[in-house]
Amino acid sequence: MRSLHPILAFAGLLLCLASADAGTPKLARMYPPGGQTGTSVEVEITGKYLEQPREVLFYEPGIAVEALEPLLNVTGPTGKAQPVEPGTRVRLKLKIAADCPLGAHGLRLRTSTGLTEYHRFFVGPFPTVEENEVINKSRNDKRETALTVPVNTTVHGKLNDATDVDMYRVEVKRGQRVSAEIEAARLGVERGIPDLHLTIYDADGKKLAAADDSALYVQDPVLSVVADRDGAYYVEVRHSMFNGAGDVYRLHVGTFSRPTAIYPAGGAAGEELKVRFLGDPKGVTEQTVRLPANPGDFAFAAVVDGVQTPSPNRLRVSPFPNVLEAEPNDTPEAISSAPVATLPVAFNGIIEKPGDVDCFRFRAKKGEQFRFHAMAQALGSPLDAVIWIKAANAKPNTPAQRVSDSRPNQLGYAPAGGLNRDTHDPVLEFTAPADGEYILGIEDERGEGGADYVYRVEAKPDQNAVYTYIAPEAENQFQPQARQSISVPVGNRTTVQVAVFTTSRPFTGELELVGVNMPKGVTLHAPKLTPGLTRVPVVFESSADAIPGAVLVDLIVRPVGGKDPMPSGYRQSICMNAYGNNDYYLHTSIEKLALAVTDAAHFRVQVEEPKSALVQNGEMALKFKVIREAGFEGPVTVQMEWKPTGISTTTPVTVPADQTEGTYLLGAARNATAAAHQITLTAASGGARAGYSETGNRTYVSSQPFKMTVAEPHIDAKIARLSIERGKTATLVCKLNHLQSFEGTATATLARLPRGIELVEATKQITSKDKEVTFTLRATGDALVGNYQGIVLDLTVTDNGQSVRQLSGSGVLRVDAERGVSPKK
């Protein structure tokens, strides 16, 4: 059966339940979390603001939507229908193709108003059964009450409380495997980390094997033993620390082979690769695999004894050949007569015992730059790799260039919080100091080793890639996926902050952002990226005749002016399984940006473009309008989400329900860069009290992109030091150095005067020709004796009909007591 297109629309009737302020939908849970290839499965989605579901956007091919509808009633314990809260449940029927790739399939639900968070649905090869103790009307906590399941079955189970134990019974023949694998942490949850424990017992209750983790899937354990007799065997699932509740899992149990590693861990694109499956209790199995034609990751599920592994191992597909280790190769001397590799190439081997070291020879020319990426943890190997390089003719004690870890950006992963195990795989950036031969060494940092400590070191020319991603919002640290997809209403705009990162060194020259595979009617507006600028506001605009729908697009950068292209693309790290101090233990990197055209919003925002520049150490008032559709009377909150360095803004401004206009205040520091910037204002339905960054039940739209220029101040003022006696007056002189001329007159006053100090004349009028301005101060009886700093000249200039305010200078005023009178305390 052919794989199906990833964008799959719904069929059936939709109920129009959306309110005028319905906003970003939220997907909290899917059940069941997976299904079998070649079958159809009903899935229930639970969340918020799901009133009008429209389609499901899949990131991988192989799954189609047969039906999609909001769920209005559920069957209660008595068998009667009970209503559910509107917008909280959706039922869909998924058709899984027979050749659907095994493993995780990312998806988002699109409603009439937006896209949900990224979630994963798992596909396996086995029939599924439910463990549900309510449906089965019995608990399966002990061997005596264990739920009997056929071999090669996937169980959808749930640990109802911290002490819950689920026991399963399978019948196997002597010499067959008893294999079990848990999918729980991999499912991805919003909060917490499912940490389950797996045990296999024989019919007498003897423990045969147990695990609560695995190198292959971290906190998801895998086990496999060989049955020594015909009969029943038991698989137990529980919490590792008896401290969880409500954890959902998929248990694969049967006679399948569960390789903990495959060697070699990859090969050349489009070629056949002879591999060995490691970690099987029945011994090593060999098989020939045809690798895909395109380089990258290859999810490969082994088939042994006619049964497929329930979830795939990761193989690498490269555009260059393999070099396999040949023992002995523990030292540079041991490989003195070994073949010398020509880069690029992939070095493959196994650290087979504690203390083992593998060495390879390669050739490089002076000045050549190569990137050595040792993959082990990313492949599910227990190896904690260290790699080093030194010249083949170096003396024994010569220090080597040595690396034990990597940074996320070196791996092409966008910045994200928490822990990412792939960064335990080292990346070494090597520049050959001279023509000649060099030694690459690899070992375990802890000195460990074993039969499945597989590695693969890909050595290729160092190429600096520039990737894009949507920058996480600091105020949404507990919602790491907040607004990391694009939802643009028909005939409207939306803005996101797009950031870039490089894999090795900062980029040079100007770059432009380009959308690839954009839907018809949607355009992208983005300012140029200049060196040192790593984040910009990007406006997605939908035409009035755009058709609602969802697609996956790429967002790349390219040099301005048609210069040599660079590797680029969209990379977003999806964080799941939050624990403790906002740490995330599951990172999924996606390479496409989800973009949806939604139904029309009930309002738009329009900014009156500034007619004058915002001067350094000054401020400006932006005027904007909220254009409301008929019937929409709710409040709208406006904020500038991205601002140039040195620019400050007011708190979010809420336009009340009975108004349509507002003013947004901007300020520029004295060190703000003088330049022109493309910026926008973002408007969200609802008031500021609800929390501007609270994405639920909010619709976001954007103003048109407009130019704001930051310029030098009109005047640089020097304020003379002055002393004044309480009850008297004194004259303060401000010397004026004109940096920018202005037409007509400007209004000048003094700001930040201390208590009890008054201006005899509140303001003065000056022109571009004036060299100074004086103010008469009066010290009242309320003035307190002392020195006061920070008095500034407050100047308002009218430029192109718009008032521009700036502060300049910094004066010192000393207040003295009346002569012959004790100072007032």
Image (cartoon, rainbow, N blue to C red):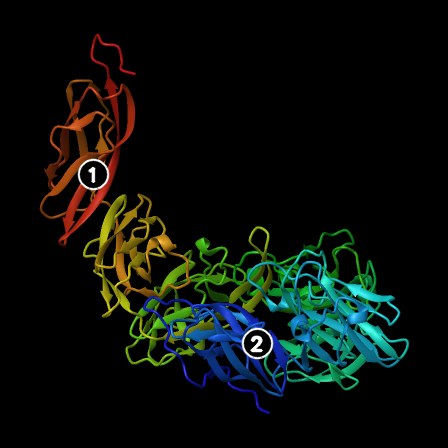
Residue at 63 percent of width and 83 percent of height? 292
Q: Which residue in the protein does label 1 denote? A: 794
Picture quadrant where residue 579 is located: bottom right
Amino acid on which the number 2 mark rests in the picture: Gly
Q: Is residue 600 visible?
A: yes
Q: Please indicate whether residue 713 sits to the left or right of residue 18 in the image.
A: left
Q: Work out whether residue 220 or residue 711 is closer to the camera in this orientation and state it.
A: 220
Mark 1 closeness class: few <14, some 14–19, many ≥20 residues within 10 Å: some
- Quarter of the rendering containing residue 253: bottom right
Residue extending farthest to the bottom is 1
Establish if 436 lies above or below 795. Answer: below
Q: Mark 2 points at which residue?
A: 79
User: How far is the residue under mark 1 from the one under mark 2?
Assistant: 74 Å
What is the quadrant of the N terminus in the image? bottom right
Residue toward you, 810 or 39: 39
Give percent across and percent down for residue 613: 22, 52
Measuring from the top left, give residue 296's x and y in whole percent. 60, 75
Q: Which mark is residue 170?
A: none
**For the residue labelled by badge 2, is the local secondary structure a helix, a strand or a loop?**
loop
The correct choice, above or below, for 705 with respect to 722 in the image is below
In the image, farthest residue toward the left:
744
First in sequence, mark 1 or 2: give its number: 2
Provide the secondary structure element on which disc 1 rests. strand
Q: In this view, does 468 lie to the left or right of 254?
A: left
